[in-house]
Image (spheres, grey):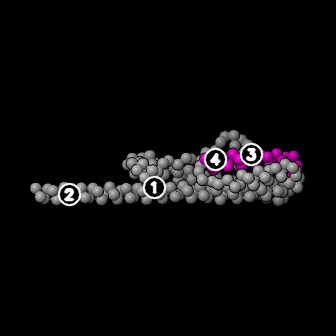
Amino acid sequence: MMIVLILLLAIILVLVVVVAFYIVSTQRSLVNLDENCKNALSQIEVQLNSRWDALLALAKTASQYAKHESETLINVIKERRQDRVITAADVNQQRGELADVMGRLMAISESYPDLKANDLFVKTMEGVQSYEENVRMSRMVYNDTATRFNRMVRQWPSSFVAGLLHFSERDYLTTDEEQKKSMPELFA
């Protein structure tokens, strides 16, 4: 009887250790993926800020040709550049704002053929496109990381641990079809 009780206690102890190990291991994996998502959003914010800087330079170059339109655009860019990227929704919102600003800049450049031929304008536009490519790559990294994180949050038995520790799914970054139409060269 005593041996059975000791054996039962040993089995219970082993099960408790295995469950505890699983919970700690899963928690560490969830934290790791959560931090990777936060890091990816931070990288996107850095790229967005660089892109806003390039757009500001583009607007300043355009101001030599279209003073009033450019001054308004410069003020809009400065205001929008100060927005912080915290969530996927913030990134998606800035994407729409970028499309709006790029559309206005392209309209100015169409109105002033000399501006379109200006070397500084052309180089700055290439820089904006380069930053857009960097943002696109960063968005892919974020969505891949969010996918791995969301799988852990949703799949059993890790979903049990995620629920206990208040981890919830991450939103994905999306691309609006209207934004693609307004900036085809940047979304190609």
Badge 1 crowding class, 10 Å Cα cut-off, few under 14, some 14 to 19, many 20 or more, is many
Label 1, label 2: how far apart the Cα atoms are = 31 Å
Q: Residue at x 63, y 50 (%)?
A: 91
Q: Amino acid at mark 3?
A: Asp
Residue neighbourhood size for the residue with mark 3, other residues' Cα within 10 Å, grouped as few (<14), some (14–19), many (≥20)? some
- Residue 21: x and y in percent read 34, 59
> How far is mark 3 from mark 4, CA to CA?
13 Å
Q: Are marks 4 and 1 in contact (CB under 8 Å)?
A: no
**Who comes first in sequence, dot 1 or dot 2?**
2
Q: Which residues are magenta?
A: 89-116
Q: Evaluate whether residue 118 shows in this view.
A: yes
Q: Could you tell me which quadrant the N terminus lies in?
A: bottom left
> Looking at the image, is mark 4 or mark 2 earlier in the sequence?
2
Q: According to the image, label 2 marks what residue?
A: 9
Residue drawn at 20 percent across, 57 percent down: 9
Q: Amino acid at mark 1?
A: Leu
| Dot label at residue 30 | 1
Q: Does label 3 or label 1 sit earlier along the sequence?
A: 1
The main secondary structure of the magenta stretch is: helix
Amino acid on which disc 4 is placed:
Asn
Q: Position of residue 137 (x, y in %)?
A: 62, 54
Viewer-side residue, 140 vs 93: 93
Distance from Cα at disc 4 to Cα at disc 1: 24 Å
Q: CA distance from mark 4 to mark 2?
A: 55 Å
CA gap, disc 3 to disc 2? 67 Å
Q: Which residue is mark 3?
A: 100
SS for dot 1 = helix
Q: Which residue is mark 4?
A: 92
